[in-house]
Amino acid sequence: MNAPVHRLFDLLPAILRIRDLSQAKVTPGLLPREDRNTLADLETKVSGGAILTTAESEILEELHRRGLGGPLANLLAVFDEQIAILQEDLDQLYDDQFIETCADWVTPYIGDLIGYRALHGASPKIAGPRAEVAHTIAYRRRKGTISVIEQLARDVTGWNARAVEFFQQLVMTQYMNHRRLHSLASPDLRAWEPLARVGSAFNSIAHTVDVRRIASGRGRFNIPNVGVFLWRLDAYPLSGSPAVRVDNRRFRFHPLGVDQQLFTRVAAEDEITHLATPLNVPAPILRRSLATYFRDYYTDSDDITKSLRIYDDADGSLQAVAWDKICVCDLSDVGATWAHLPDDDKYAVDPKLGRIATPATAPADRIVYVDFHHGFSAGMGGGEYERAASFETEDTPPKTVVVPDEKETIADALVELAGEGVIEINDSGRYEETLAIAVNANQRVEIRAADRCRPTLILGDELKLSGDENSEIRLNGLLIAGHGICVPSTASNKLARLRISHCTLVPGLALAPDCKPQFADQASLIAETDGLQITIERAILGRLLVDPDATVSATDSIIDGTAAGAVAYAASDAADPPGPGGPLTLVACTVIGKVNAVAFDLVSNSILLAELADGDTWTAPVTAVRRQRGCVRFSYMPLSARVPRRYRCLPDATQPAELASPRFSTLRYGFPAYAQLAANAGASLLSGADDQGQPGAFHHLFQPQRETNLRVRLDEYLRAGLEAEIFYET
């Protein structure tokens, strides 16, 4: 018997206990749960004919002894169970007095007691209100201070933030008993840092008063004004990535060999009273900042992860380059070479262009590896972010091969799989290979990057996919360039499903150093087989050419034909104009280029940016052949599009065109703000989704809801008489 029942049993008169034990049987219900499980396991082994060890026999004998109980003991066990329920209820009532331990249903009641106002659950930090309710009292103790405004901005938006009191930067006659030596009417022209940060969130140069209202987004420097600066871009790491060789001495950080700005890895702030510095936000790294504060950005021998690090294999093993062996300079183009190549034994780094120059004495075959951070809007297209949930599946493949631990190349791993299983790449390396994937009947082959890895696959030729009946291929977490993917139409190719998750099939196949697509008229994916089901999730792809009898379903993705007048989606024939591609489903997607589909089964919360060029043979930039089928809702597409009946779509002929203007920060893949709607896009478009969010590939970020949350909190926490406005730094 468990302890409480035993204590109750011992309180009975001895005669009753003796009579009860005379009728006792082994009763598992009198044992604690873990002992009941142990008893069941041991009795199962005995009934199966297994021989117990001496220790197991002693445990079984002890459990039988403790589990003996007669009718009276069983009745007491029922009483004990009800007492335990009452005790648990009393304990929970006590726990419900505290936000840290209360039940979920109690949280809104505690929030109501302290006047907490609920927000949109747009940011992961506020998806559940428990943490913010817990912080509310601490915040209100500092209500009206700039530090709590900054902390609130981080908490309710999930973006990095900095709050600024603009009266601190006003030119004014100072009271001599309260001098502000940092606030000079005339800037020091010898101080580079204040001049480099003029107009940014970290501006420190004083201005004359600006009487325009801060709510207009233009007036800043006035006594009642507070600015909240937000970084919509985040810094995403790439670790142990081979730098791309230009020649024996020149390299680029980015695995596609493009010039790309390096970003700051965000350093956590330990105290709420600490105001953000350039090291606490994902800001582009300035050359002068890196040179002056190099050890704040470079991962030193202590291995505390910072913004960047360089490795080389000078002695045959990978070694981190010491910080004092690196200089920072401008490595811009000068004719056929770069400026300021080092003449001594130092490495040169240019964070603005993402370039590296090795020492003049470096071996010609030296390989350089790098850790660095690049900017992007969201976890999409592959990267060193959390993707483990996308690996989940009901049926487990029979085999997993790890590259490069078990096999050095993906091609060798495919041979090992022999048509079924998973290849997992557990680094962010560069693989230059020519591949073909063939899958056995009723099986699947998956090539995926391990969680928090992003390998780069440079194809030497088309990646050909094939399979037998009911076969499936999955690609997850890969950056694929050089050539596209082809599912050829052959008599033996009966591939049923293709799933592309968290991958980038580079639009234009390859990029020039300025990110210009090199093969803009080439497709990223050609699907020539009928009956193929293509699923795309959180991916970036170039042009898709799909058989009319195949189907495509895309979610939270970008399909980029490289220009609004180019082809983004059509059939795989060579006609001009091309025929319609298979039925298309788009949910929260951005499509750049013309679209011709058999049908739109569903287009929701999406942006289709397409236009006809001069002399174009297309009748409309977006066309569905079967317009009695499907639904188009809460999306942007040209007014001339020939699609099923629209529901709440943009542009709307009854509204001014300016309200639906689709302005983007940039539409060139490789730039940090790629495919991000600009802040000056049409107001109706910025809230045109079915939940009043932004349509397009970044709908899942819920950017308008985040901004609304912040405005609610600013109204609540600002001191009387102050005005605040939100400014987007990126």
Image (cartoon, grey):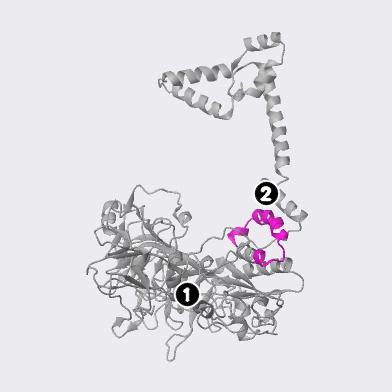
Looking at the rendered structure, the secondary structure element under dot 2 is helix
Mark nearer the N terminus (1 vs 2): 2
Is residue 595 in view?
Answer: yes
The amino acid type found where label 1 is placed reads Tyr
Q: Position of residue 458 (x, y in %)?
A: 31, 67
- In the rendered image, the quadrant that contains the N terminus is top right
Disc 2 designates what residue?
Answer: 104
Which segment is the magenta one?
122-149
Give above or below for 22 relative to 365: above
Q: Position of residue 315 (x, y in %)?
A: 24, 59
Q: Residue at x 43, y 56 (%)?
A: 451
Q: Residues within 10 Å of mark 2 (few under 14, many from 20)?
A: few
Residue 137 on the magenta segment: yes
Q: Residues within 10 Å of mark 1 (few under 14, many from 20)?
A: some
Q: Position of residue 26 (x, y in %)?
A: 57, 18
Tell me how many marks there are.
2
Identify the image quadrant of residue 348: bottom left
The amino acid type found where label 2 is placed reads Asp
- Magenta span: chief secondary structure: helix
Identify the image quadrant of residue 498: bottom left
Q: Which residue is the extreme one toward the left? A: 364
Is residue 691 in view?
Answer: no
Q: Position of residue 248 (x, y in %)?
A: 25, 72
Mark 1 in CB contact with mark 2 (< 8 angstroms)? no
Please name whichever residue, 137 or 618, is drawn nearer the observer in this view of the structure: 137
Q: Which residue is the extreme one toward the front? A: 177
Please name whichever residue, 265 or 345, is drawn nearer the observer in this view of the structure: 345
Give above or below for 270 relative to 528: above
Disc 1 designates what residue?
Answer: 674
Q: Which residue is the extreme one toward the bottom? A: 615
Q: Residue at x 45, y 79 (%)?
A: 593
Identify the image quadrant of residue 462: bottom left
